[in-house]
Amino acid sequence: METLRQVVLQEMNEERYNRKHIDTKIRNEILANPDMVRRLDHGEQLIEKYLAGEYYESKMRRIAQLENLDVRALVMDIFVGIAYSQKPELFTSVSAQMASRLKFSDKTEAITTVAELMAVLCATDAFDISKEKKLSSLMVVSRIPLSDKLISFIDNSQYLPPMVCEPLELTHNYSSGYLTHNDSLILGNGNHHDGDICLDVLNTMNKVALKLDTEFLCAVEEEPTFELITQDQIDQWKKYRHQCLMFYVLMNDQGNNFYLTHKVDKRGRIYACGFHINTMGTPTKKAMLELAQQELVEGVP
């Protein structure tokens, strides 16, 4: 039986960690800033000029896929995506991350087109593209002013932790089980459909309560599954370990009774959703999880 406390805690967790709410917050702050609205206007003019140009054949085919898009909405989407880069990030990484916003069927074409759009919109001064040395990689850093509160929210947002209340019933292919957002239950960009994906099976799996084996976590140190060579890899691993420990403590403090949601791939195979806590992770990840409702198994030879 769900308690009001569990539901409230779940809503708080989603509000605090859910990246799906960040785009809206960034968009609202951009629209509330007159200077950024002017940059949006400028960006819209630049993109319209870019779309009206004459280029080589393959580029013209790529640009043709943008013809039916709302240009202002496209500029806003790119501004919102770049606003996450409060510190310099690789141009290739940022363009690849934002490529999914174009909904192109070909990922390579989407990345190439986003990179071109970013180069065009750099003239708005909403962000900078630069490189330290001649042979250095291109870097992107946002110049979009965001409030300290929103920056803190972005820093705190992570892949959502498990649910501390029972997930909502899945009733269609665009539902998540979470309280504050829906999502496609079919993994992979461009794979969503409304056909049968056995929602009853997903609902059954979503309702299996789990808990952390705290004794195991206190006794075993999680190790990386690959060799850490560069300082960046070492720093990323330390950051990941810190995030994991934070979520272990959070789940334990909120009752150590939680649920993983599940999705299917285009072949119908089921995957648990979770980054820091997951039944389908490394051996250590699997070993740290137990059924919350335990029973003595009888009648087994």
Image (tube, rainbow, N blue to C red):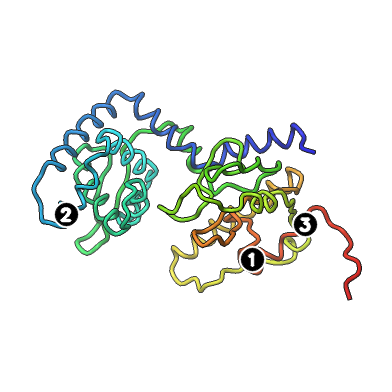
At label 3, counting other C-alpha atoms closer than 10 Å, the crowd grade (few under 14, some 14-19, many 20 or more) is some
Looking at the rendered structure, the number of numbered marks drawn on it comes to: 3
- Observer-side mark, 1 or 3, equals 3
Structural crowding at the residue carrying mark 1, measured as other residues with C-alpha within 10 Å and reported as few (<14), some (14–19) or many (≥20) = few
Q: CA distance from mark 3 to mark 2?
A: 54 Å
- Element type at mark 3: strand
Are the residues at dot 3 and dot 2 in contact (C-beta closer than 8 Å)? no
Residue with the mark numbered 1: 222
> Residue 272: x and y, percent?
61, 57
Q: Position of residue 86 (x, y in %)?
A: 38, 43
Which residue bears the numbered disc 3?
291
Residue furthest out toward the left: 54
Residue nearer the viewer, 245 or 28: 28
Mark 2 or mark 3, which is nearer the start of the sequence? 2
Q: Amino acid at mark 1?
A: Glu
Kindly identify the residue that appears in the image at 61 percent across and 67 percent down: 282
User: Is 283 placed above or below 21 here?
Assistant: below
- In whole angstroms, how far apart are the C-alphas of marks 1 and 3? 21 Å
Question: For this view, does 98 lie left or right of residue 154?
Answer: left
Mark 2 neighbour class, 10 Å CA radius: few under 14, some 14 to 19, many 20 or more: few
Image height of 231 relative to 142, above or below: below
Pick the front one: 206 or 37: 206
